Amino acid sequence: MTGSRGREGRDGDMTELEIAGQVVELVRRLAGPDAQAEALVTRIDLALTRFANSFIHQNVAESGVAVRLRLHADGRTAAGSGSLVGADGLRALVERTLAAARLCPPDPAWPGLAPPAPVPPSAVFDESTALAEPDERAARVRAFVDAVGGLEAAGYCRTAYRSGAFANSAGHSAVGRTAEAAMDGIARAGGADGVARLCADRLADLDGAALGARAAAKARAAADPVELPPGRYEVVLEPAAVGDLLQNLSWYGFNGKRYNERQSFADLGAAQFDPSVTLVDDPLHGSALPYDLEGSPRRALTLVDAGTTMAVAHDRRSGAEVGVASTGHGMLGASTFGPIPRNLRLLPAAARAVGGDGPASAVEAGQSGAGGDASTSAGGTGAVADPDTAALVAGVERGLLVSDFWYTRVLDPKSLVITGLTRNGVWLVEDGVPTRAVRDFRFTEAYPRALGPGALLGVGRRAVRQPDRMDGVWWEAPPLRLAAWNFTGGASG
C-alpha cells in the first residue's frame, strides 16, 4: 500500500480513519464488547537525498502504511502491528494480538482508554513539502556544494509526510497530517569540519547556499587548531550544541516514568534553572501530528517557566501512577523507557511564556530560520557566521565558542551528569573575538547545573530548529552564553 502523498486516502483506498475503525470493530466482534482496543493508522512517505565527496550518491524513498493495535482483554494487555490493510490482513492482526494477550501476565496498572476529547488540527502543513520531488532536494544539495567553494561536502536533504488517524472502543477518534524537511551538511577543509543544519516545516525554507556558506566558513576557520589545557571555561554554545542539552534533558529529566521512579532531577515547583530559561514542549509549533500514540491531544506543555520546573511529560500509564492526566506524550517504548518530550523549545530572549501550558505570541519573534547571514560577523578567525551568536561572543573576555556536541553519554541519570565530545569546531575567544581554533575536548558536566540559577550570562534572540535522526522529532534553541563548562581532557581521553 503506497502512501497518500498529501491526501487522506486515494481513490479506491480506505482512509486511515476507516481502517482504524474497522480494526476496533473486529476486536469487538472477536473478543467481545468488554475488550478495550485502540488502533493507530499512519501513512508515511519518507525521502532522502544523500551526498558525499560533493556528489549525490543516493536518492531513496519509501512509502507505506502502518497499523498498530493495542488491546486490553480479561485483565491482560498486548500490542501488535502490521502493514496489510485488506480484510484478511486486519483480521490476522487482531487475531494474533488477541493470542498474545492470552499469554501476557495480568496488567493491574492498565490506565484505560483515552476518552472522547477534542483534538486540535495540525497547526502546520505544507502541501508542496509533502509532494516534493527528488530534483527539489537535489537543487538544495547543489546550492550547498556550490557554496562551499571547492571544499569537500557531505550530508543529506530529506522530506517527510505523514497522515494518520486514531480510533478506540471508547468512542474517541482523531485525524491529522504533517510534513517536514531537513538538511544537514558538512564542509571539510583538510582535517577541519564545519557543519550547518536546519529542520523546517517547509522545504522552501531550506536555503542550501546559506547553509553551505556557513559550513565552509566554519571549516576554514577551524584549521590549525591549538591544544588548551582542560578546566572550566566560560562558553558560548551554538544552537546545535544546545540541541544536545535539550535532548538529554528531555529523555532523562522531563520523562514522567523516570520522575515517578525518582530517577529524574526534576523537582516540580523548584527554581532549578536560571530565570532566563523557559522550556516548552510545543509539537504544534512545528511539524507533528496533533495526537499521541494513545489518541491523547498534543498541546504545548511548559516544562520550565522562567527558571522554575513546572511539569514533566506523561502518557496515560505514568500519569495514572501519580493521579494526573496524560500530557499527550504516549509513544512507542514508553512503558519501558518512559514518555519524553520530542519537540522541545528553549525560548529565545525575546519570548516569554504566559499562563497555562502555552507560550506567548511573542514566541514568534524566535521563529526558526537558516541562522542568518553566512558572512563572518565577529572578526578574528571568521568562526562566527551568525549575528546572534556574535552578540554573545562579544561579551566574553576569555572563553570558548563551541559548535556542537556528540557521543554524549549519561554518567549519573539522577543529576544528569553527561560526558561527551566537542565536534565541528571549537575556538578560543579573547576580548570578544574568536582568535584561534582549538582541538576538540572531552567534557563532563551536569546539564541542569550548567543551566542553573546564575549560570546563564546570555541567551540569543533567535531560535534555530535542529533535526533529530527521526522525522517529527526536533530541538529548537538559540545560542547560549554560559558562565562555565567543565572540560576534562582532550578528545582522546
Image (cartoon, rainbow, N blue to C red):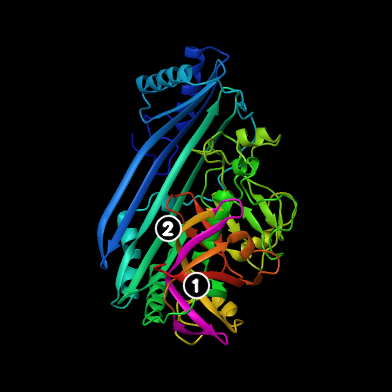
**Residue 59, quarter of picture:** bottom left
Q: Nearer the viewer, mark 1 or mark 2?
A: 1
Query: Which is nearer the eye, 15 or 487?
Result: 487
Q: Which residue in the protein does label 2 denote?
A: 182
Drawn side of residue 182 relative to residue 293, left or right: left
Q: Is residue 268 magenta?
A: no
Q: Which mark is residue 366?
A: none
Drawn side of residue 351 relative to residue 180, left or right: right
Q: Which residues are magenta?
A: 412-437
Asked if residue 144 shows in the view, the reply is: yes
Q: Is residue 150 above or below residue 15?
A: below
Query: Which is nearer the eye, 468 or 453?
Result: 453
For numbered disc 2, what is the local secondary structure?
strand
Q: Whole-percent x and y of residue 237?
A: 54, 70
Q: Give the spatial CA distance, label 1 vs label 2.
A: 22 Å
The earlier-in-sequence mark between 1 and 2 is: 2
Q: Whole-percent x and y of residue 26?
A: 47, 17
Which kind of residue does numbered mark 2 sit on?
A: Ala
Quarter of the image with the C terminus in it: bottom left
For numbered disc 1, what is the local secondary structure?
strand
Helix, strand or loop: magenta stretch: strand
Q: Is residue 137 above or below residue 125?
A: below
Query: Which is nearer the eye, 436 or 86?
Result: 436
The total number of labels drawn is 2
Q: Which mark is residue 402?
A: 1
